[in-house]
Image (tube, grey):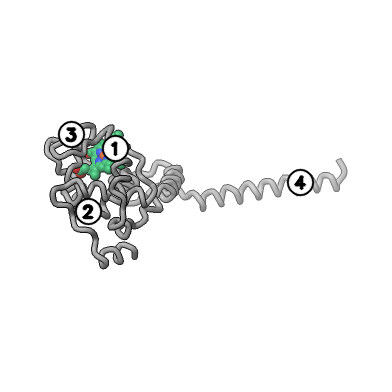
Amino acid sequence: MDELKFNKLFAGVLLAALLLMAGIKAGQVLVPSHHGHGHGGEKVANAYPIEVTVVADAGTAVAAPAGPEPILALLAEADIAAGMKLAKKCTACHVFEEGGANKVGPGLWNIVNAGKGAVDGFGYSAALAGFGGAWDYQALNAFLYKPKAYIAGTKMNFAGLKKPKDRANMIAYLRSLSSAPAALPTDAEIASEAE
Ligand code: HEC
């Protein structure tokens, strides 16, 4: 081996060693070890949980729903008959008549403005039973858009009504299922929902 070749080889080995060391350093900086200073006292066995956390956060962010679009302004002009047709999507699980029995889901007569999880004799999920509040128009809009996004852990297995018009028609139909239908939203309520 002549001297030039040897020098090149030596330089190559040196460069490789430097890159390796730089790589290890960078690794320590990017994925710090948590020995001796775990957050809030929880034990961090190694650096990998950090990456797992980052992935989980990204997933949640992506899954966050973009909707539901406001529907209060659509209610006064909504099509109750169209809502009644849409209700075929619900009748596998729900009965709509007054005094109707609970099936897979609770009876839905007089549901607008009723307390959440308040139908007698129905075994609600803990998630819905503990959610609180009433089924006002906006709660129904959010729930019917994507039940599991509005109430995480609900046992209502229904993908949701993605079109604002469908939700408005459905909610107008639900509103009609009462001996004293709830008041339509006021202009002020419509304006504040749109904000
Ligand atoms: C596959 C069955 C299924 C379908 C389809 C379904 N639901 Fe439900 N629904 C349920 C169950 C089960 C619950 C109770 C959820 C819980 O306890 O978490 C529920 C709860 C509800 C509630 C809350 C009732 C209360 O008393 O708090 C409303 C409102 C509702 N459903 C409306 C609808 C509408 C409107 C449709 C159709 C567009 C529909 N659901 C389709 C099963 C279903």
Tell me the quarter of the image containing the C terminus.
bottom left
Mark 1 C-beta closer than 8 Å to ligand 1 = yes
Mark 4 C-beta closer than 8 Å to ligand 1 = no
State which tag comes first along the sequence, 2 or 3: 3
Which numbered marker is on residue 136?
2
Which numbered marker is on residue 90?
1
Residue where numbered disc 4 is placed: 10
Residue at 37% x, 49% y: name it. Answer: 36
State how far apart marks 3 and 4 are (Cα): 82 Å
Q: Is mark 2 on a helix, strand or loop?
A: loop
The amino acid type, in three-letter code, at marker 4 is Phe
Disc 3 + disc 1, Cβ < 8 Å: no
Crowding near pointer 3: few (<14 within 10 Å), some, many (20+)?
some
Q: Position of residue 73 (x, y in %)?
A: 31, 60
Residue where numbered disc 3 is placed: 102
Q: What element carries label 3?
A: loop
Q: Where is residue 184 in the image (x, y as percent from the top left)?
A: 23, 58
Disc 3 + disc 4, Cβ < 8 Å: no
Crowding near pointer 2: few (<14 within 10 Å), some, many (20+)?
some
State how far apart marks 4 and 1 are (Cα): 76 Å
The amino acid type, in three-letter code, at marker 3 is Asn
